Image: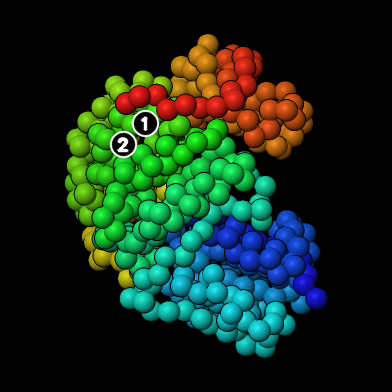
Amino acid sequence: MPGKVALHTLGCKLNFSETSTIGKQFLNKGYEIIDFKEKADIYLFNTCSVTENAEKECRQLVRRALRANPDAFIIVTGCYAQLRPEEISAIDGVDVVLGSKEKFKLFSLLDSFDKKDVSCIYVSPTDQLNEFGTAHSSDADSRTRAYFKIQDGCDYKCSFCTIPRARGSSRSMESSAVIEEFQKLISNGYKEIILTGVNVGDYGKAINSNLYQILLRMIDVPGDFRIRISSIEPNLLTDEIIHLTAASEKMCKHFHIPLQSGSSKILKLMRRRYKAEDYLNLIFKAKEKIPDLGIGVDVITGFPGENDEDFLTTYNFIKELPASYLHVFTYSERPDTHALSLPGVVDFHERKRRTQMLRILSEKKKFKFYSEMKGKVLDVLFESHNDNGLMKGFSSNYVRVAHSFNPELVNTISRFEVKHPQAEYCTSNILDTKNSIDLIAC
């Protein structure tokens, strides 16, 4: 008799799309998906391995689930499971560890969800991670914004990163399949499709396509929707993509572009594919083409070799960037990465201090960007959650907007005038609800 299943995702938007797809498999088998805070018969954790803290959180969550139900069946999958399955299987109460290739095959691998005395491990070697597992948001969740995986794996060799080992080489969903699944998401009522992958900008490699070409086909699909690129490497954000984003209302006016460091010296040690000057030129070119463009920036603090001067270079570099927010990560030593062999290890407390400085800078950047939106008209997609009488959503350029709760606005793209910028969101007045979004000629 099917029971209750709780799903928990750690890490990136790609993981969210994959968790949703796994959740749909449970729904199709008659299981009930419940909130992680509730007592479940089965708990599934889709994990991240970018930092040591992400792995630590996974272990803590497993123990929390078992406190809620000691008899629960525990499944752990994702990047952490792929890289260190034995470590996870040693956690008391874990029943099954599924690698990256196996995460979508649990019902063919498992004949029951009965509690086991010994953990079972199903993990393929990295060199066998050559399949593309389709994943996107489904009725396993209640989002108005759908995550849609179009790419997986990475061929880059950044010295701090384990993801190529956890995900395998870069591969893409066939273009015809992308359009077919994209049309299904639109017909299911999603108004915003977020394109996800390990390296989305690398889409099309080995299948005679590229991200720009698939975007052209997507915006040509009829319907009331918009497209957001989850994250794109600076060397892969082409003039064509920038021009298309400026020209089409179906493209969100928002790019999340990893920087990692504002010091070209550190970028070289990280084995990144650009210099700080290249990044700076790209950002100002994009802002010139799209003045209200929202720009998110990833930064790593405390990388080996980053002395005080290097950090101040990064801080001042970002201070002058027209960025709207930062995602700041404290450098975390990852097993089997080149960065472990680099000299100049930064004290952990100094790493945290630098992280805090950049997070404060991020708050200032965000408020400045929100303040620049005052009096402007933004297209906002509201979510269904009622937060003490308020509903919240995101604009095309990724401004968080709040309005008094109105169920008629849920999952509609509506025009709002920004009134009062605050630290976490802007209040607004509705102008009209858009029935459709049309492509403006490039």
Look at the numbered discs 1 and 2 and tell me whether their residues touch, using CB distance below 8 Å: yes
In the image, what residue occupies the spot 51% across and 58% down? 135
The answer to whether one can see residue 317 in this image is no
> Is residue 276 left or right of 26 when viewed as pictured?
left
Residue 230 shown left or right of residue 315 in the figure: right
Q: Kindly identify which residue carries mark 1.
A: 245
- State the colouring used for the structure image: rainbow
* Left-right relation of 44 to 182: right
Expressed as whole percent of the image width and height from the top left, the position of residue 70 reads: 76, 75
- State the SS at label 1: helix
Q: Secondary structure at mark 2?
A: helix
Position of the C terminus by quadrant = top left
- Hey, which quadrant is residue 393 in on the image? top right
Q: Which residue is mark 2?
A: 241
Rendered residue at 55%/49% (across/down): 184
Viewer-nearest residue: 109 or 388:
109
Q: Amino acid at mark 2?
A: Ile
Q: Position of residue 144 (x, y in %)?
A: 62, 41
Q: CA distance from mark 1 to mark 2?
A: 6 Å
Q: Indicate the position of residue 227 as horizontal and vertical percent values.
A: 46, 38
Q: In the image, what residue occupies the spot 62% across and 21% down?
A: 433
166 sits left or right of 384 in the view:
left
Is residue 394 placed above or below 173 in the rendered structure? above
Residue 204 drawn above or below residue 380? below
- The label shown at residue 64 is none
Q: Quadrant of residue 243?
A: top left
385 vs 347, nearest the viewer: 385
